[in-house]
Image (tube, helix red, strand yellow):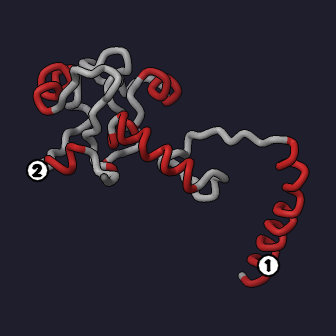
Amino acid sequence: ANSLSRAHRDGAYMMFIDHNLVGDDFFTYLFPEMFDTSDTTNFPGFIGSNHAGPNTRGPLKEDWTKACPLDWTAEERDEKCISLQEAIYGTKLLKRLEQIKEDIDPNYMFDCYGCIGNNRIKSVDEDEEKTDDSSSASSMLVTCCSYLIY
């Protein structure tokens, strides 16, 4: 098992498709020929992560035969379209990677924009808030020292 989607493991070549050309025809006719779309709870990953841009999403969550409209706001696209991460890894692999991320990094130390698990919401309990003062102080110390060295 690894973090590559089935498309990356089984693919013979990579094809670049301009966002303007990825319309409903792609998701209606080509996509179901290339990927198994019969399980509507398991979107198949198909996008190369190093070729995805900020506007890249999968199709609509409610209808995989319809492309995510580029003229929607980012909020609308996030709500109504298959996420970039799910379009890259697929539903099952993304859930597996998110669980690995949660197990290995439960304190959110290695979060970055667009990374696996970056959409998690950290729940802070009262005990953590009380003990957090020392980490804030050490964080300030590191920041101050960094400025002095710079």
Q: Position of residue 50 (x, y in %)?
A: 32, 54
Which one is nearer the viewer's eye here, 33 or 41? 41
Residue picked out by circle 1: 145
Q: Position of residue 59 (x, y in %)?
A: 32, 25
- Is 38 on the left-hand or right-hand side of 132? left
Which one is nearer the viewer's eye here, 145 or 91? 91
SS under mark 2: loop
Q: In terms of sequence position, does the residue under pointer 1 or pointer 2 come before the other?
A: 2
Q: Quadrant of the C terminus?
A: bottom right
For marks 1 and 2, give the CA distance: 50 Å
- Is 100 on the left-hand or right-hand side of 91? right
- Residue drawn at x 42%, y 43% is 96
Residue 80 found in image quarter:
top left
Residue 15 found in image quarter:
top left
- Residue drawn at x 48%, y 50% is 100
Q: Which amino acid lies under the numbered mark 2 shown in the image of this protein?
A: Tyr
Residue picked out by circle 2: 13
Q: Position of residue 108 (x, y in %)?
A: 63, 52
